[in-house]
Image (cartoon, helix red, strand yellow):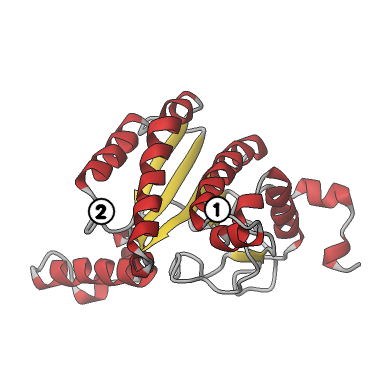
Amino acid sequence: MNKHNQPAEWRESVPVPRHVAIIMDGNGRWAEQHGLPRSTGHRMGVEAVRRSVRAAMELGVQYLTIYSFSSENWARPASEIDDLMGLMRRFIRRDLAELHQNGVRIGVIGERDRVDPELLALIDDAVALTSGNSALNLQIAFNYGSRAEIARAARRLAEQALAGAIKPQDITPEALSAALDTHGVPDPDLLIRTSGELRLSNFLLWQSAYTEFVFLDAFWPDFGRELLEQAIDEFRRRSRRFGGVVARSTV
């Protein structure tokens, strides 16, 4: 029997992915398709985030990482950047109380430079307020680029070696993983990208070494529980061998 035609009871026996990462792509194209300004597409994208957080909790996902603003997005028009930063502010102010009440723990990865101090303060308050929660770990990649993250981690380890705190031979894959922004968070089991694009766009490059990828044609504002379930169902059909012969699970 083909693994893509496994009986339903077999798929139900496979656990949901512990960690789902999402490249939320297609807000602008969704807006263009509907004859609306790009800013409307971004606002509808925030609604999709809300749906996705609820669906992830209902489906039993423990970690959800969303790519909200990349370090390359600074190349966009200033008006669009201002709109995106405003959306981040409003999301925190409007949704923080509900997220906290529902047991969501918020984490943020990425660089802090170039980000408005007022927004940084809001982010820090959200992280501190929800630090004791455990129903869902919501990790927001904001002003994030994976190559820069890896370079920062390598630089930290090099500085420790130069200071004599560690030896060069102590710089192992495990040590580098521990120096990344995502330290303490398991690598993603499933990475979803919307909009039909087939690339990682500098997102979680190190962490995705053995991640299962699912690419969806839908634009991000149309994403919700149905498409999340579709991606998870595809994940459950996969045989994950991690370089070996026998399939095994980490979830």
Q: Name the residue under label 1.
A: 41
**Where is 67 relative to 147, above or below?**
above
**Where is 155 relative to 48, above or below?**
below
| Structural crowding at the residue carrying mark 2, measured as other residues with C-alpha within 10 Å and reported as few (<14), some (14–19) or many (≥20) | few
Question: Percent from the top left, x then y, of residue 96?
Answer: 41, 31
Q: Which residue lies furthest to the left in this view?
A: 163
Q: Residue at x 73, y 46 (%)?
A: 226
Determine the image quadrant of residue 247.
Answer: bottom right
**Toward the viewer: 35 or 230?**
35
Quadrant where the image shows the N terminus: bottom right
> Image check: 2 left or right of 52?
right
| Structural crowding at the residue carrying mark 1, measured as other residues with C-alpha within 10 Å and reported as few (<14), some (14–19) or many (≥20) | many
Q: Which amino acid does label 1 sit on?
A: Gly
Do the residues bearing badges 1 and 2 touch, measured as CB atoms within 8 Å?
A: no
> Image check: 148 left or right of 25?
left
Q: Residue at x 61, y 51 (%)?
A: 221
Among the two numbered marks 1 and 2 on one chain, the one whose residue lies closer to the N terminus: 1
Label 1: state its secondary structure. Answer: helix
Q: Which residue is drawn at 43% across and 71% down?
A: 202
* Residue 115, numbered label: 2
Q: What residue type is labelled 2?
A: Val
Label 2: state its secondary structure. Answer: loop
**Toward the viewer: 77 or 133?**
77
> Image check: 27 left or right of 218?
left
Q: Residue at x 60, y 43 (%)?
A: 52
**Toward the viewer: 26 or 132?**
26
Question: Percent from the top left, x then y, of residue 160?
Answer: 15, 66
Distance from the alpha carbon under mark 1 to that under mark 2: 22 Å
Determine the image quadrant of residue 74.
Answer: bottom left
Residue 234 visible in the displayed image: yes
The tally of labels here is 2
> Image check: 134 left or right of 243?
left
